[in-house]
Image (cartoon, rainbow, N blue to C red):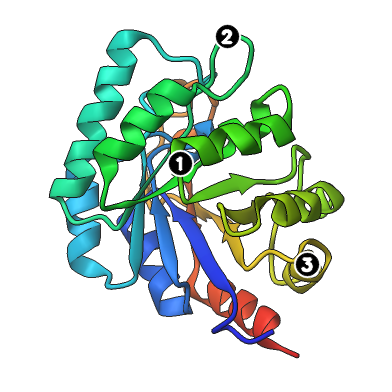
Amino acid sequence: MSAIDLTVEVCADSLDSAIAAERGGANRVELCASLVEGGVSPSAGLLATARQRISIGLHVMIRPRAGDFYYSADEFEVMRRDVLMAKQLGAEGVVFGILDVAANVDIQRTRALVDLARPLKVTYHRAFDMSADLFRSLQQVTETGADRILTSGGAKTALEGAATLRRLVEQAGKRAVIMACGGINDQNAQATVEKTAVREIHVALRTVAASPMRYRNENISMGSIEGNEYQRYIVLEEKVSRLIRAVSAS
């Protein structure tokens, strides 16, 4: 498979990572904040600056908080405003997912956000994998008009969910793009694509970067993950390049 046939999306929660994704050859960036919590909506400042600094596709996570994907009316209003912000600041797409309390796709509110987002592209994210029935959810997502679904086939990794992913690709047909995710790297990307028949993959490729701080107060933790103040996760250009070469090899 050539790089032209496959779209590679890299998720990034910093400007440096977004720039590295483009330099490494990615087709698109999914921009978010706080990937250690699964990703939430990025700030307006990060979005605006990333749009200025990269020229590849830029899709924006719309997620008002970490945790489950059942949202209150106030949280839904936050999502609406973040969709409008993404449009205003030049994104090409938005990424979100809403479930009801029974873990079905919330068709009404999802469709409302899809309509609000147009003409931007819409990805229904991994809330899909947390739904009660993936194939029923596939039908429900297509009813909302969303363009693609980000999924690992309900498994921890795309390879573990490969059989389900392939069935989703077959059943989705031209109604929606199935984008595979979950543990994809340069070592398994080609196998993932071959086993699932997807034409888009979503990768993290995160690397731990140590803080340059010379003085460290190890007695205090600012977040829920102890000791995380003095390290962060970044995307490296060379890792993206390596993955692109791996999936381009025939």
Residue 15 image-quadrant placement: bottom left
Q: Amino acid at mark 3?
A: Asn
Is residue 163 positioned above or below 9 on the image?
A: above
Q: Residue at x 50, y 55 (%)?
A: 209
Residue found at the very far left of the displayed protein: 88
Is residue 215 positioned above or below 68 on the image?
A: below
Callout 2: SS: loop
Residue 230: numbered disc: 1
Residue 101: numbered disc: 2
Q: Position of residue 172 (x, y in %)?
A: 65, 51
Spatial CA span between label 3 and label 1: 30 Å
What is the crowding at mark 1: few (fewer than 14 residues within 10 Å), some, or many (at least 20)? some
- Residue located beneath label 3 in the image: 188
Spatial CA span between label 1 and label 2: 38 Å
Q: CB under 8 Å between callouts 3 and 2? A: no
Spatial CA span between label 3 and label 2: 35 Å
Q: Position of residue 201 (x, y in %)?
A: 61, 62
Q: Residue at x 64, y 32 (%)?
A: 137
Q: Residue at x 58, y 47 (%)?
A: 150
Question: Which is more toward the observer, 173 or 63?
Answer: 173
Q: Amino acid at mark 2?
A: Val
Left or right, residue 12 beside residue 148: left
What is the crowding at mark 2: few (fewer than 14 residues within 10 Å), some, or many (at least 20)? few
Looking at the image, tell me whether mark 1 or mark 2 is earlier in sequence order.
2
